[in-house]
Amino acid sequence: MKVTIEMNNKEVQEYIGGDYLSPEFEYQSLIQNDAKVILENSGFQGIETGDITVTIHD
């Protein structure tokens, strides 16, 4: 399985939230890891972080 997530900066800010203190360069990996956990909890046990592509654009 391959997963592609495309988000704009506003959507990323809404997802991350203002209370989360993390540098911008970590946003992609945070979203990848969250998606992996969601998919694993939904029964996709074979999913790897490398199978998830996150694209953030303006």
Image (tube, helix red, strand yellow):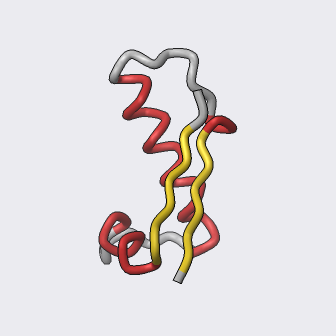
Pinpoint residue 18: horizontal percent, then vertical percent. Answer: 31, 77
Pinpoint residue 56: horizontal percent, then vertical percent. Answer: 55, 69
Count of all numbered marks drawn on residues in the image: 0
- The residue that appears at 46% across and 74% down in the rendered structure is 8
- The residue that appears at 36% across and 72% down in the rendered structure is 11
Q: Quadrant of residue 43?
A: top left
As displayed, is residue 27 above or below residue 37? below
- The residue that appears at 50% across and 61% down in the rendered structure is 6
Quarter of the image with the N terminus is top right
Q: Answer left or right for 27 relative to 14.
A: right
As displayed, is residue 37 above or below residue 32? above
Task: Return the residue nearer the eye: 33 or 3.
Answer: 3
Task: Return the residue nearer the eye: 21 or 25.
Answer: 25
As displayed, is residue 55 above or below residue 40? below
- The residue that appears at 54% across and 40% down in the rendered structure is 3
Pinpoint residue 12: horizontal percent, then vertical percent. Answer: 41, 70
Task: Return the residue nearer the eye: 30 or 19.
Answer: 30
Q: Residue furthest right?
A: 50
Q: Answer left or right for 33 relative to 16.
A: right
Pinpoint residue 21: horizontal percent, then vertical percent. Answer: 44, 72
